[in-house]
Every structure is written in C-alpha cells, then in structure tokens.
Amino acid sequence: MSKRLKPVPKFASEAEERVFWESPDNDSTEYFDSSKSVRAVFPNLKATTTAISLRLPDALLAHIKAMANKMDVPYQSLMKLWLAEKLDEAEKRNVPAKRVAAR
C-alpha cells in the first residue's frame, strides 16, 4: 500500500516557500513520491557566464590567490563570491551604482 502524501501548501512568495522547505520540520518525502521522479535533460542549456578581462596589480592577485589557497577554493570563485557579497551589501544600503563604481 502506498504512503498517503501531504498536499504541498500554496506560498505567497518564493521566500516563503524557501523558508518552508529549509525548515527541519518539513521532510520533502512526506510531499513527493521519489519513485515517480523522472530525470530531466536540458540538451540546449547554454552557460550563463561571460568571460571578462580584468587587470589587477600583481601583488593584489597574489594576495587573492594566497587567501583562496588558505580557504581551499579556486581564486576566481572566491573573487566572484566577494563581488557578489559587496554588491548585496551596496544594495542593502541603497547605494547608487555610481558611488559603488567609483570606489
């Protein structure tokens, strides 16, 4: 006999849904039957990154690489993380883009 699944609640926003699913009180196996899962294939999916050229002083790049090595992450990944964090901080402070770019 198959297990009776709980209905998935309706969410007002993606943030609300994220909180629901991240809660340790909610087990997705109570809402979905994994035996009915189907593998998704996206053959035409394109990369969503763009290569750029960025000139940095040698000392700064060496420092970034040393920090990345200590953290055991690729230095380019660390740079992307730092840039994203700074952008989030600036957006939270409602800093105009001109001021951020001038730094």
Image (tube, grey):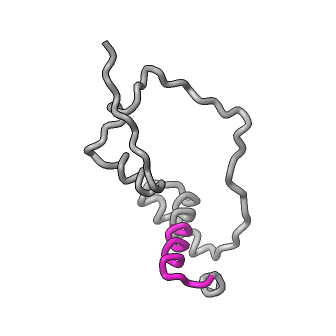
Closest to the observer, 32 or 102: 32
Please name the residue shown 70% across and 69% down the image.
54
Q: Position of residue 2 (x, y in %)?
A: 33, 16
Q: Position of residue 44 (x, y in %)?
A: 73, 36
The part of the image, by quadrant, that contains residue 30 is top left
* Residue 83 is inside the magenta segment: yes
Please name the residue shown 47% across and 21% down the image.
36
User: Relative to residue 20, is residue 93 depicted above or below?
Assistant: below
* Residue 37 is inside the magenta segment: no
The magenta segment is 82-96
Please name the residue shown 72% across and 57% down the image.
50
Q: Position of residue 89 (x, y in %)?
A: 48, 75
Please name the residue shown 73% across and 66% down the image.
53
Q: Quadrant where the N terminus lies?
A: top left
State left or right for residue 56 relative to residue 17: right
Q: Quadrant where the C terminus lies?
A: bottom right
Q: Residue furthest top?
A: 1
The part of the image, by quadrant, that contains residue 55 is bottom right
The part of the image, by quadrant, that contains residue 3 is top left
User: Relative to residue 101, is residue 25 depicted above or below?
Assistant: above
Closest to the observer, 27 or 78: 27
